[in-house]
Amino acid sequence: DAGITQSPRYKITETGRQVTLMCHQTWSHSYMFWYRQDLGHGLRLIYYSAAADITDKGEVPDGYVVSRSKTENFPLTLESATRSQTSVYFCASSVDRASEQFFGPGTRLTVL
Amino acid sequence: DQQVKQNSPSLSVQEGRISILNCDYTNSMFDYFLWYKKYPAEGPTFLISISSIKDKNEDGRFTVFLNKSAKHLSLHIVPSQPGDSAVYFCAASAVFTGNQFYFGTGTSLTVIP
């Protein structure tokens, strides 16, 4: 399917476990982003990538790792999940840094 | 510290009337602003944008107004329709931040039939 997809859509894990959230886009957009949405905070940028093998930190990068070996994929890994990482995670992509972003449907992550 | 603020968590409007959603920002260097709409269990979708060189941008029923001196923007929806019921986020960016977008906390709009 064309567009941007995220998997899984829902995930429950335990404190200390490693979790990877997947993001895939079919537009060949250069830029990809990871946000988390929390009540009272709106959407906050975790990491972004300008191209394959180029990544950079956003507002709230601590506890997260990203990679981008292929243009179309941008996985987000929580190396040792904490309860404060319970959130809804959105992946997005855009043609360039200044253009509007296209968002995936989100992954609801619960850390027990 | 929240650089983009939406002080009204919710808004209810009758169908056919005007909906006005507000957004304030603290950084005068922001030069590009967007509005996104979000339905439950879906990702945000782009709605309309405005550059700081303009004070108004219109797209069908949606108009965004920018008041740079007040660091304030607003989204007007006329006429409001039940399908407009969603959460609306404003976002701002600037070249100096490398165009990173800062999002507000969102306003939940309910259009009553």
Image (cartoon, coloured by chain):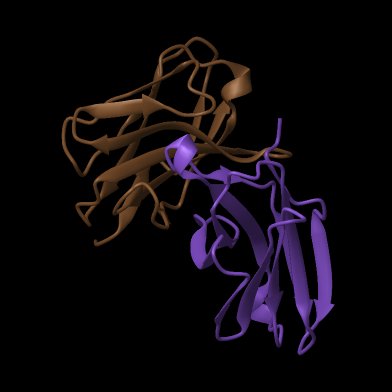
Q: Residue at x 21, y 44 (%)?
A: A72
Q: Is residue A34 above or below residue A25?
A: above
Q: Is residue A69 left or right of residue A31?
A: left
Q: Is residue B106 left or right of residue A98?
A: right
Work out whether residue A10 can be spotted: no
Q: Residue at x 16, y 36 (%)?
A: A70
Give the camera-side residue of A112 and B109. Answer: B109
Give the camera-side residue of A83 and B32. Answer: B32
Q: Quadrant of residue B99?
A: top left
Give x and y (percent) for residue A80. 46, 11
Q: Quadrant of residue A22?
A: top left
Q: Is residue A2 left or right of residue A6?
A: left
Q: Which chain is purple?
A: B
Give x and y (percent) for residue B63. 63, 77
Which image quarter is the N terminus of chain B in? top right
Q: Is residue B63 above or below residue B108?
A: below
Give x and y (percent) for residue A10. 48, 40
Which image quarter is the C terminus of chain B in? bottom right
Work out whether residue A104 can be spotted: yes
Give the camera-side residue of B42 and B73. Answer: B73
Task: Chain A: give its colour.
Answer: brown
Q: Is residue B35 left or right of residue B79?
A: left
Give x and y (percent) for residue B38. 58, 60
Q: Residue at x 30, y 28 (%)?
A: A55
Q: Residue at x 39, y 47 (%)?
A: A92
